[in-house]
Amino acid sequence: MLNERQLVWRCRRGVRELDVLLTQFLASDYKRLNALERADFERLLDIQDPVIMDWLFGKYSANDEGLDKLVARLRELSGL
């Protein structure tokens, strides 16, 4: 598991909107996640920005229950 400082760094993305969304999620929701959900968030941070953006805009699913649930939370937070 990454520490908070590492997570903040990993939330920094090439796509500014994604950077803001992930950083906001980290600040507002991350502490409420259980260990499995936190692991899913770390896995999400390993995914390339265009893929995450496609998931957020509903172009296709991650085909992974944990990541799909996390993306749904991010969509809700962003108002998508």
Image (cartoon, rainbow, N blue to C red):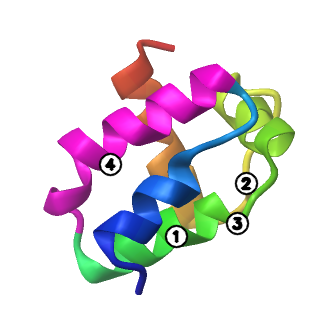
Residue at the disc numbered 3: 46
* Type of amino acid at the residue the image marks with label 2: Ala
* Type of amino acid at the residue the image marks with label 4: Leu
Residue drawn at point x = 23 percent, y = 74 percent:
34
Q: Can residue 69 be seen in this view?
A: no
**Crowd class of label 2 (few under 14; some 14 to 19; many from 20; radius 10 Å):** some
Contact flag, marks 1 and 3 (Cβ < 8 Å)? yes
**Crowd class of label 3 (few under 14; some 14 to 19; many from 20; radius 10 Å):** few
Distance from label 1 to label 4 (Cα)? Answer: 11 Å
Distance from label 4 to label 2 (Cα)? Answer: 20 Å
Q: Which of marks 4 and 2 is nearer the N terminus?
A: 4
Distance from label 3 to label 4 (Cα)? Answer: 15 Å
Distance from label 2 to label 3 (Cα)? Answer: 13 Å
Q: Which of marks 1 and 2 is nearer the N terminus?
A: 1
In the drawing, what numbered circle is on residue 42?
A: 1
Residue drawn at point x = 60 percent, y = 20 percent:
17
Residue 51: % across, % down: 82, 43
Residue at the disc numbered 4: 26
Query: Which element is circle 1 on?
Result: helix
Q: Is residue 40 visible?
A: yes
Distance from label 1 to label 3 (Cα)? Answer: 7 Å
Residue 17 lies in the magenta stretch: yes
Residue at the disc numbered 2: 62
Q: What stretch is highlighted in magenta?
A: 16-33
Q: Which of marks 3 and 4 is nearer the N terminus?
A: 4
Q: Name, please, the residue furthest toward the top.
A: 79
* Type of amino acid at the residue the image marks with label 1: Glu
Q: Quadrant of the N terminus?
A: bottom left
